[in-house]
């Protein structure tokens, strides 16, 4: 398994248009770690597939990044607890 970061820039005034993205992330049991960043556990080598599922739900003006997170990570003041994020890193991140 691997841990993936999903990061996006969307216009907050258009946030109501993004319910399908939030529904998909919740279906995947993704965890919101910052206001525009989520992490999701998936099979190794799935960044492109994750991107391809989310991208059609975005608007042309939006930005989207999907990237595997490695164990060499540092963080501060995430929305989820440090313990929960550390557990996600230790249990799922590679390297």
Image (cartoon, rainbow, N blue to C red):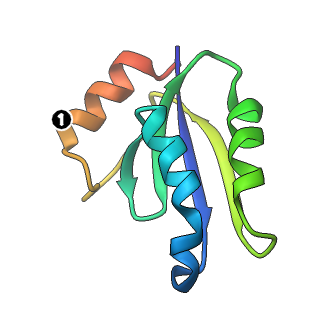
Q: Is residue 60 above or below residue 69?
A: below
* Residue 82 image point, x, y percent: 21, 42
**How far across and how far down the image is residue 78, in percent?**
29, 55
- Percent coordinates x, y for residue 60 in the rendering: 81, 71
Front one among 60 and 84: 60
Label 1, residues with CA under 10 Å away: few <14, some 14-19, many ≥20: few
Q: In this view, does 5 lie to the left or right of 44?
A: left
For mark 1, give the secondary structure.
helix
**In this picture, is 11 found above or below 40?**
below
Q: Name the residue under label 1.
A: 83
Q: Which residue is drawn at 19% across and 45% down?
A: 81
Note whether 2 is above or below 57 in the view shown: above
Q: Which residue is drawn at 60% across and 73% down?
A: 10
Give the residue at x 46% y 48%. Answer: 38
**Front one among 69 and 18:** 18
Q: In the rendered image, which quarter is residue 61 located in? A: bottom right
Q: Is residue 87 above or below residue 67?
A: above
The answer to which of 35 and 15 lies nearer the viewer is 15
Question: Which residue occupies the extreme bottom position in the image?
Answer: 13
Q: Quadrant of residue 17?
A: bottom right
């Amino acid at each position: 398994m691997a841990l993936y970061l999903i990061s996006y820039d969307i216009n907050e005034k258009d946030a109501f248009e993004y319910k399908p993205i939030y529904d998909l992330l919740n279906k995947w049991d993704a965890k919101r770690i910052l206001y525009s960043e989520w992490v999701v556990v998936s099979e190794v080598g799935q960044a492109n597939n994750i991107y391809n599922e989310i991208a059609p739900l975005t608007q042309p003006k939006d930005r989207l990044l999907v990237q595997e997170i490695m164990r060499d990570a540092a963080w501060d003041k995430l929305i989820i607890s440090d313990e929960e994020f550390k557990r996600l890193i230790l249990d799922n991140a590679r390297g």
